[in-house]
Image (cartoon, rainbow, N blue to C red):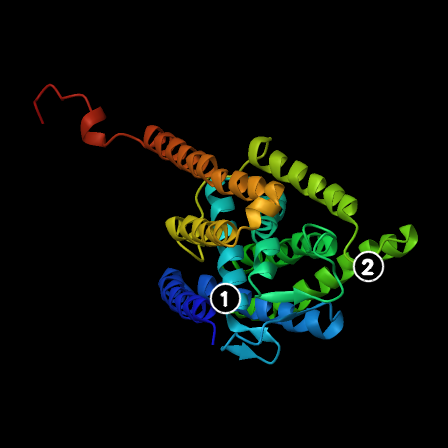
Amino acid sequence: MNPLFLFLEISATLIFIAVAAVALRHGRLPFLELMSAAAYGLLLEEGDQLLFQTYHYSSDWLLVIDRAPVLIGLIWALLIAGAMRITDALGVNRRLAPFVDAVLVIAIDLAIDAIAIRMGMWTWRGIDPTVGWFGVPAGNFYSWLFVTFGFSLLTRGLRDWAAGRPQLEWLQLLIPGPAFAILVASIVPFAWLMVLTGAEAGEGLWMFAIALAMFVACAARATFGPGRSVPDGLMTAIVALPLAFFTRLSIYGLFLLALLALGIGVHYPLLLVVSVVLFLAEFPLARLVRSRLAEEATTATTASPEPESLNREPSPTGA
């Protein structure tokens, strides 16, 4: 038994139960979205290991469904749900919101994956520690862009479709299947280019860099370009905004501590720099969210009509 793994499993499970209770108070759809996100996370881990067999998890995990640790499914559910909450609070262009969600999630993946394999959480088969992103295959990061994108795209689409038709909300439980299909379809061009260029297993960072640049460009346009929506998302929130940031900062912090404690940063200074930069980027992101929400609150207050009693001139009779 690994005490750290046990602590993480218990902590994540308790947090997830608390989040699920809050989501249910917000309504049936937020709760169903959270449950489907957890199922999606487990489907990803199980499906990837069965179909591609490129990695396996440590035997030290206690709560496991076949090959997939329950913790991993819960964490990805919280991260995807948190990213969607932050995106809604930013008031981004609704059509491009899935790109923002994907960028928010991949930032954490870039910071933690290379540390996680050195903590023994999982192992990539046949990948040298110097290949890809410090031992993490480039295809993993490319795929995670579409993991979040597919789930967000379908979930946000169902939100709009089910508006005013609550009976359709139960369809959210079916989202993991087509979202996983989107992921598998997105891997095809990457795999084809790997074969075409003769790249070895784990290589292809340039392909991921191109895909990431496209996602970041779309996310930037969604966040700062025209057609932005009202910053809110409170009624459709799966997780509360403070918890969304708390989860992200906790994960960053945990893996940064591990990076320093295990001396990984000494051997891989670039990984240390990237992890610290991505961690610090959370704070201007939080300030931008607060600024957008405050601006919207001010606008709403200004636009609200004054009470009639304040606007009405006194009548000659004093009535």
State left or right for residue 123 relative to residue 126. Answer: left
What x and y, as percent, mark residue 96?
A: 63, 43
The earlier-in-sequence mark between 2 and 1 is 1
Mark 2, secondary structure of its residue = helix
Q: Nearer the viewer, residue 278 or 131?
A: 131
Name above or below for residue 20 compared with residue 129. below
The 10 Å Cα crowd at callout 2, few under 14, some 14 to 19, many 20 or more, is few
**What residue did someone put label 2 on?**
188
State left or right for residue 189 relative to residue 75. Answer: right
Name above or below for residue 105 compared with residue 43. above
What x and y, as percent, mark residue 244?
A: 43, 51
**What residue did someone put label 1 on?**
74
Quarter holding residue 213: top right
Quarter holding residue 211: top right
Name above or below for residue 225 compared with residue 34. above
What x and y, as percent, mark residue 163?
A: 51, 57
Give the amino acid type for the residue marked by disc 1 in the picture.
Leu
Screen quadrant of the C terminus: top left
Residue in view at x 35 percent, y 63 percent? 25
Q: Nearer the viewer, residue 274 or 41?
A: 274
